[in-house]
Image: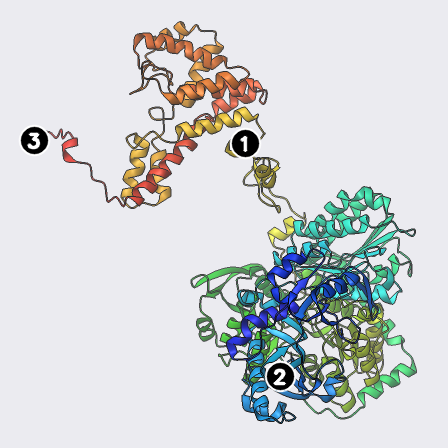
Amino acid sequence: MSAKAITEASGKDILNRHLSLHGAGAATCRFATVNATTDWSKLSVDHPWLLTTPLVVKPDQLIKRRGKLGLIGVKKNFEQVKQWIGERLNKDQKIGNAVGKLRNFIIEPFVPHTDAEEMYVCIYSHRAADTILFYHQGGVDIGDVDAKAVKLDIPVNASLSLADVKSKLLVEVKDAKVKERIAKFISALYTTYVDLYFTYLEINPLVVTADNLYILDLAAKLDSTADFICRPKWGEIDYPPPFGRDAYPEEAYIADLDAKSGASLKLTILNRNGRIWTMVAGGGASVIYSDTICDLGGASELANYGEYSGAPSEQQTYEYAKTILNLMTSSPKHPAGKVLITGGGIANFTNVAATFQGIITALREFQPKLVEHNVSIFVRRAGPNYQEGLRKMRDFGTTLGIPLHVFGPETHMTAICGMALGKRPIPQVASVEFSTANFLLPGGQQAQADLKASSDAEALGSGSDESDNVVDGVLSGAQRNGSSLNRKFFSTSTKAIVWGMQQRAVQSMLDFDFICRRSEPSVVAMVYPFTGDHKQKYYWGHKEILIPVYKKMSDAIHKHKEVDVMVNFASMRSAYESTLEVLEFPQIRTVAIIAEGIPENMTRKLIIEADKKGVAIIGPATVGGVKPGCFKIGNTGGMLDNILHSKLYRPGSVAYVSRSGGMSNELNNIISKATDGVIEGIAIGGDRYPGSTFMDHILRYQADPETKLIVLLGEVGGTEEYDVCAALKDGRITKPLVAWCIGTCASMFTSEVQFGHAGSCANSDRETATAKNKALRDAGAYVPDSFDTLGELIHHVYGELVKTGRVVPKEEVPPPTVPMDYSWARELGLIRKPASFMTSICDERGQELIYAGMPISEVLSKDVGIGGVISLLWFQRCLPSYVCKFFEMCLMVTADHGPAVSGAHNTIVCARAGKDLVSSVVSGLLTIGDRFGGALDGSARQFSEAYDTNLHPMEFVNKMRKEGKLILGIGHRVKSINNPDVRVKIIKEFVLENFPACPLLKYALEVEKITTNKKPNLILNVDGVIATAFVDMLRNSGSFTSEEAQEYINVGAINSLFVLGRSIGFIGHYMDQKRLKQGLYRHPWDDISYVIPEQYN
């Protein structure tokens, strides 16, 4: 929900900080808040007026009509207020049907005034305007304010004038000075309302005394989607739950997951001890599942409402499932056991197998508790990769130890609710669909055709005289009045621009074009302002094509004059600006806005601007729409398997309009099974103010002679369905209309529940789904008893149309095949291919990076250090702590050895030549070899071979001298036995003290005694001590076999420590030269010996 109620304290705090900036002339609201943790002595110090002023105290928990309920204490002193709160704090309070505990209170100074000084002010928003209500008498006994108050509408984007306030709102205020003061206050209040994205603001009473204006009681709602705009002005806002429903930490956890995710994750706990738990995919589907459970008598046992959608990752789905399972198994056991309904519609783009894997992981974790609580699980899902997801779930169910029933799109979406509640039998063997992924399996097309033929025959033979008369009655109603919006949005020649780098969605559109036998792709260009102009490769059937990508919208529009549709995938932050930009180009006639979470005020401005220019907007918060055989928007219709199942590659006779994008896919499925298919389907979007309304599209369908039957899927919240009722009654709609509004369960809950869509919340009885369904039925629409029977009713009405000859079913023509993408075929396990690379040290594919089997979180929490990371990535195991410490010491002592050595010198020269960091460091690394730093591997081999062949140190020295070879790891240019290298001393002492055994190091020290007798600088150097200690670690730490140890020596692993360590120093030299701003290096002539021949021979 975008419009969220805030506490009175939050509202007054916001007004205190902003109202005076616009010249309101009102007194600052003084208040103090109290809860169970309040320190009363500190409170009186922070607010000294509490001790000197008569006080008013009341609960601050979104409770309406507190005065009528006796929940306001007036003219009390501080001690009396403490007593008043103490008597009510954490006590149950019943308000209507809701029972909750009073936990939060607000204390304010008592403002002496007369009844005549109390007034009423309210501002609320609707589609085309903001309305200000004013009544010159306010307070507890105001009564029916809607009937009494004076109303002033301010159209969206219009300004409010003082003259209008005085002449239209304040007609009952006779005193000119008082009228002026109130007018300025209302003007400032409205400016603040708009600037801070309020959606509702009520003050009752507003007290107007001779010297000031006081805001006494306040109720307010903010557009929470405007947080990215208003956070600096709002500050930290807490949105409390409705009274009667406590805020659970699990709800806060899911809300936090939702805020950090591009997906949608929602959870509301209705009855912690309930036996019916749901885990539903999709905003619309989640409402329908709750409706069905309540219709079947499960309202009192329904434990939660929630949804996951928008392609959550496996890890996010796991966290969501884990939270629900923890709630389910931490509440008391139920004698009848518990049920978990894991349902959903047909996904558009969510990978069902991936999300199911997250659910399976959570189920496995909770398996013992699920058995203990006697849980039965019912699963129904479809969408991309659903076959693999259902297979995994079925296979897992055989090991779970509790009943787990799994169904796909062959089963009606909500059928599992009846099964779970024992209202319908559980089929032992489910029928299997004929397709998988992007194509129909052999034999599947004919089987589907046979099934369809029998379905049509049944439709021709079904129906009663009574229903026939009803159809006749609707069709022979008043004459069509026509519609201002009767143009066709899409055709076989529709061309579109896509805003955003949505490669998957674009390919989906092109594949749809291809199976619809379009001659050309519908997407001709893309706009993406974050790159330069270029071309992107896509598939058109079997061949590859290039689609241009433009940085600027204007370039795309001017170079593609045939375009009249834009599909806007911009985020909620940029969708407004990008849509406004495209509205400047007259050739664009339709814009689909996919983003969810666009602030309501921005959407209303877009609607006004689009109406001015005759542009149709689909969305926001939508998956789009589809015109079978012609065009589809983005991911509408899901993967090709669902498009083929739902026969969307050719037009049918039934048009539908829905709010929910996910449910539009389910409607495609239902309509394809009940009729000859869809001719057009639009999901107008779940936001409170969709860019186009139900009526806009229904009147288009009414005007289209090819549309024979119209389906409307409305929902709780808003009043657009009543426009449809009016059109049915006055004859503007004469075609049969099947309608259902979801959200009938809302009236069965004791506290307000915000469903998955921003607009699905009833603000009055008229906005409830039950009231709307009744009104539609009374107006002449076909309304089923529940969503469960929607498909049956559509099939019945369609059968009457076929029977009376109004619909002639078309011959089925199989679509062309489309090659499956390699990546998707591999995802489904249909093909295999040898991998180009193999890796065994790191895996970045999951939610968390893994080093050699250890999650990165564990790497950090265990504080393994750089040495531990080296042990994991280089050796695929956790080595002992002394080994990790040894690695780190080696890195520290080899990090640098001054600017004169060849590696550092090269790095410095490159840096001064203006080269980048990588080039400069690489130039230094390339000098590492046997003569500089790279002697570790050679030293390890020489000493190991000598030791392993039992050569006496003296024999080893004599052998190397006889062969004319240097002993690698022995000798230093500067250091000697009399001037030892401290680095060697440190490592040597550490190894001798901490390693379980170090025979090779001791052997090397014996060699050193012999070589230093000949020359004092022939000491064991850093290379030698690290190399021999490294070999001792490999051989004696107990972590490696002798074969593994020798292999690491042979592959050159020991040199890696010097390479890694010295890279640190090279980077330091690079940064040092840049910091010192050193210029290009040129070697001095006097340091070069020129040995040029005296003459040329």
In the image, what residue type sits under mark 3?
Gln
Q: Nearer the viewer, residue 41 or 297?
A: 41
Residue at figure coordinates x 32%, y 7% from the top left: 1013
Whether residue 765 is situated above or below residue 162 in the rendered picture = above
- Report the quarter where the C terminus lies: top left
- Which of the two discs, 2 and 3, sits closer to the camera? 2
Q: Nearer the viewer, residue 766 or 194?
A: 194
Location of mark 3 (residue): 1095
Location of mark 2 (residue): 209
Query: Residue most toward the front?
Result: 52
In the image, what residue type sits under mark 1?
Gly
Whether residue 301 appears in this view of the structure is yes
Give the image quarter of residue 755: bottom right
| Residue 259 screen position, x and y as percent | 62, 58
**Marks 3/1: CA distance?**
63 Å
Query: Residue most toward the left?
Result: 1095
Residue 300 is labelled as none
| Label 1 secondary element | helix
| Label 3 secondary element | loop
- Which of the two discs, 3 and 1, sits closer to the camera? 1
Do the numbered discs 2 and 3 sit on residues whose CB atoms are within 8 Å?
no
Q: Looking at the image, tell me whether mark 2 or mark 3 is earlier in sequence order.
A: 2
| Residue 358 screen position, x and y as percent | 70, 49
| Residue 293 screen position, x and y as percent | 84, 63
- Which of the two discs, 2 and 1, sits closer to the camera? 2
| Residue 296 screen position, x and y as percent | 88, 65
Location of mark 1 (residue): 868
Check disc 3: other Cα within 10 Å, few if <14, some if 14-19, many if 20+: few
Give the image quarter of residue 465: bottom right
In the image, what residue type sits under mark 2?
Thr
Whether residue 781 is situated above or below residue 632 in the rendered picture = below
